[in-house]
Image (cartoon, helix red, strand yellow):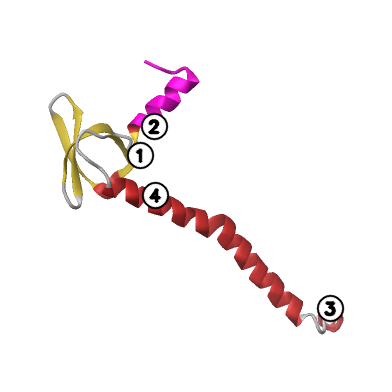
Amino acid sequence: MTTLYILLQAAGAGQQGGGASFWIMIIALFFVMWLFMIRPQRKQQKELEKFRNELKKGDKVITAGGIYGTIAEVNDRTVLLKVDGEVKLRVDKGSIVRDSSDVQTEQQKDGYSK
């Protein structure tokens, strides 16, 4: 116990006057974290919100559950998706995550066309 106390005292004595550099490092750490983590996530959220607000009839989309469909009707909070034949599903706009035409063009580039 006393050995630990002596080591902590010695470590504390060697770091006197380093308070300013400690705060600079903490601020730099938060800046880097904001730059590489928070900022790109906010940008992605804004793009997704813009995509959801611009949905219109006939757009091909993918839901968060992986359901591919074509928009048949758009309301304030919901979207009516035509899934297959006459099958229609009403889903929340928040569950629409992607434009399926982007996925189809990516598959064609990779050689996975149907």
Quadrant in the rendering for residue 63: top left
Quadrant assignment, res 8: bottom right
- Mark found first going from the N terminus, 1 or 3: 3
Tags 2 and 4 touching, CB below 8 Å: no
Q: Which amino acid does label 1 sit on?
A: Arg
Magenta stretch holds residue 97: no
With respect to residue 45, does 61 lie above or below? Answer: above
Main SS class of the magenta portion in the image: helix
| Amino acid found under the numbered disc labelled 4 | Glu
Residue 25 on image: x %, y %: 71, 70
Which element type, helix, strand or loop, lies under badge 2?
A: helix
Cβ atoms under marks 1 and 3 closer than 8 Å: no
Q: Within 10 angstroms of label 2, few (less than 14), some, or many (20 or more) residues?
A: few
Task: Look at 44% across and 18% down and name the residue there.
Answer: 112
- Secondary element type, mark 4: helix
Image check: 81 left or right of 26?
left
Query: What residue is pinned by disc 4?
Result: 47
